Every structure is written in C-alpha cells, then in structure tokens.
Image (cartoon, rainbow, N blue to C red):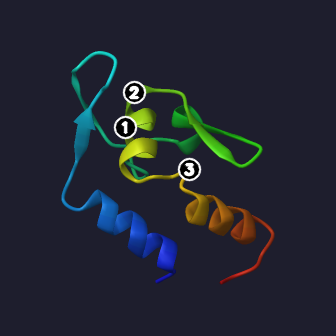
Amino acid sequence: MPILAVECNAWKGSDVGSIDSETGAFVSLFHPRHQRWDDQFVLRVAVIEPLTAEGKATVRLLKLNYKRVVEGQLLAAVGHTR
C-alpha cells in the first residue's frame, strides 16, 4: 500500500463523517463506491477543492491538500511511483 494511502487511512481512523465548520451539522465523508469524485471535488492546479459539504469534510479530515498527498497525486497522474 502506498504511504499516502496509509497516511490518509490513519487520519480517517474509524470516522465516517465530520462536523461542517459553517453549519455545525454532521456530514458523511465522501464514499467512492456510492458517489462520483467529480460531483464532490475539482482539481485546480495541485489543490483539491471540495464542491459539497461531504467533499469539504473529506478534504479536511483526510488532509487531501497536505503537501505529501498532493505530491503523490501529481506523481501518480504522470505514472510515477514513490
């Protein structure tokens, strides 16, 4: 398993959701088997921008814009592995 997946899984832990910082409401995390990535996020340069409350919770909790994660995503996109 790539180190980035290990890090994201560690940050996620057993959490299935998070509190939305704007509304205070509980929101579920993005579920890749039930939701489309393109409906939840957009990639702008090297930053994943969430489009929904679920996307925002997922980006924050899994630290998807953390420098090592972004670097790994960019390397994977061009076919390189760490």
The residue tagged 2 is 53
Labelled pair 3, 1 in contact (Cβ < 8 Å)? no
Foreground mark, 3 or 2, reads 3
Q: Which SS class for mark 3?
A: loop
Which amino acid lies under the numbered mark 2 shown in the image of this protein?
A: Ala
Query: Where residue 18 appears, x then y in whole percent?
Result: 25, 38
Q: CA distance from mark 3 to mark 2?
A: 16 Å
The residue tagged 1 is 57
Label tally: 3
| Residue in the image at 30% along x and 58% along y | 12
Q: CA distance from mark 3 to mark 1?
A: 12 Å
Residue, far front = 67
Q: Earlier in the sequence, mark 3 or mark 2?
A: 2
2 on left or right of 72: left
Picture layout, residue 16 above or below residue 68? above
- In this view of the protein, which residue sits in the foreground, 11 or 52? 11
The residue tagged 3 is 65
Q: Which SS class for mark 1?
A: helix
Picture layout, residue 82 above or below residue 11? below
How crowded pointer 3 is (Cα within 10 Å; few <14, some 14-19, many 20+) is rated as: some
Foreground mark, 3 or 1, reads 3
Picture layout, residue 2 above or below residue 72? below
Residue 48 found in image quarter: top right
Query: Where residue 45 appears, x then y in whole percent?
Result: 77, 44
Query: Where residue 23 appears, x then y in whole percent?
Result: 28, 15
